[in-house]
Amino acid sequence: MVIDHGQGVVSVLHHLASVDVHEGDSVAAAAVVGRSGQTGLAPEPMLEWRVYLHAVAVDPLVLGSLL
């Protein structure tokens, strides 16, 4: 799942078992957007969160409080 936060910030969530929002939905801060799962080669249920700023990967913990 890809979430566009605006201002060039994009979150990408991998290994979701379910997605609770649809394309074009507005999502409030801290809203549940899906459930973590065990997909692909994941050895256990997990969530992989990646953040990009103008297409450059950044540490999510740096921007986490702003999202």
Image (cartoon, helix red, strand yellow):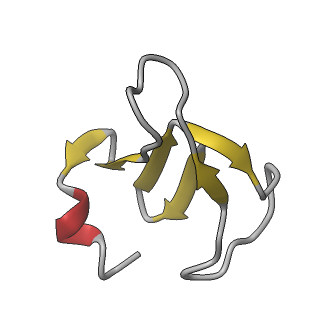
Q: Residue lying at the far top in this picture: please name it.
A: 41
| Residue 28: quadrant of the picture | bottom right
Specify the quadrant that holds the N terminus.
Answer: top right
Specify the quadrant that holds the C terminus.
Answer: bottom left
Q: Give the x, y percent position of residue 62.
A: 17, 68
Q: Give the x, y percent position of residue 12.
A: 46, 45
Figure check: 62 above or below 15: below
Residue found at x 24% / y 41%: 56
Q: Is residue 36 or residue 25 the one in the foreground?
A: 36
The mark total stands at 0
Residue found at x 57% / y 54%: 3
Residue found at x 51% / y 64%: 6
Q: Give the x, y percent position of residue 4.
A: 55, 56
| Residue 27: quadrant of the picture | bottom right
Figure check: 65 above or below 18: below
Q: Give the x, y percent position of residue 39.
A: 55, 27
Figure check: 60 above or below 63: above
Q: In screen coordinates, is 62 left or right of 10?
A: left
Q: In screen coordinates, is 30 left or right of 57?
A: right
